[in-house]
Amino acid sequence: MNEQIQPSTVRVFIALAPPDDAKGELERELRPAYSAYPRLRWNRIEDWHITLAFLGELPVATVPLLQPPLADLAAASRPLRLALRGGGHFDERVLWSGIEGDLEGLRLLTKEVRDVVRACGVAFEDRPLRPHLTLARSRRDDSSSVVEIAAGLAAFTGRPWQTERLHLVASNIGRGPGPIHYRDIAAWRFGAEPS
């Protein structure tokens, strides 16, 4: 018998994703760093996202409960105008690009998303929003690469773009060696009637 055991929990977060052309701009800016710092654990470009609420490990059965109210929230919300700008780091280990634009709208959307999650009875760590796009993580023995790349990104300003969808995402972090991968569980267009 070759039955695959299905996991009983899934690691989940709710996020926004920049459009491909905005990610492409930043990718071009980072090309020299990709070559100069190959030991960094670079996030896959298709996985770049702006986290609004990190829910952690949830029972698989809980995830469907989140979908209707998140779909309703997206349908009732207008798209936000954002841009990628500059760079920075957390604890000299995590490299990120900053977010600018309608930050007040982003804070309001984040609050509404988190209110929906709480109304579904899901407990999570309610950290303050620090709008950013995580790009890479350094290895424990390397504390200079991330700081150097962040300084090189200081002048980067990407073109403005509109958010298109609210994403409910699963990640495989902690599921073995290799890069972190994400997959959409569901995504809903802003300002569209839920189906």
Image (spheres, grey):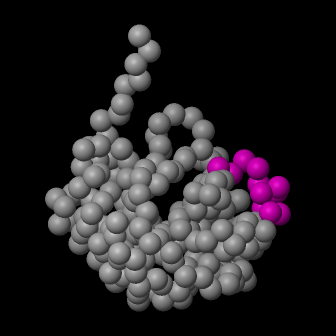
Judge by depth and name the residue closer to the eye, 186 or 34.
186
Q: Which residues are magenta?
A: 31-41
Judge by depth and name the residue closer to the eye, 161 or 194.
194
Q: What is the quadrant of the C terminus in the image?
A: bottom left
Q: Quadrant of residue 55?
A: bottom left
Q: Is residue 54 left or right of residue 121?
A: right
Q: What is the quadrant of the N terminus in the image?
A: top left
Residue appearing at x 20%, y 65% in the figure: 118
Q: Is residue 21 left or right of residue 170?
A: right
Judge by depth and name the residue closer to the eye, 17 or 154.
17
Residue appearing at x 62%, y 62% in the figure: 135
Q: Look at the image and say whether residue 34 sits in the magenta stretch.
A: yes
| Horizontal and vertical percent position of residue 91 | 53, 63
The residue lying furthest to the front in this view is 195
Relative to residue 104, is residue 152 depicted above or below?
A: above
Residue appearing at x 36%, y 82% in the figure: 77
Relative to residue 33, is residue 165 depicted above or below?
A: below
Residue appearing at x 29%, y 43% in the figure: 60
Q: Quadrant of residue 92?
A: bottom right
Q: Is residue 102 visible?
A: yes
Judge by depth and name the residue closer to the eye, 176 or 76.
76
| Horizontal and vertical percent position of residue 175 | 47, 36
| Horizontal and vertical percent position of residue 12 | 37, 53
Q: How many marks?
A: 0
Q: Is residue 130 visible?
A: no
| Horizontal and vertical percent position of residue 96 | 59, 68
Q: Is residue 74 left or right of residue 119?
A: right
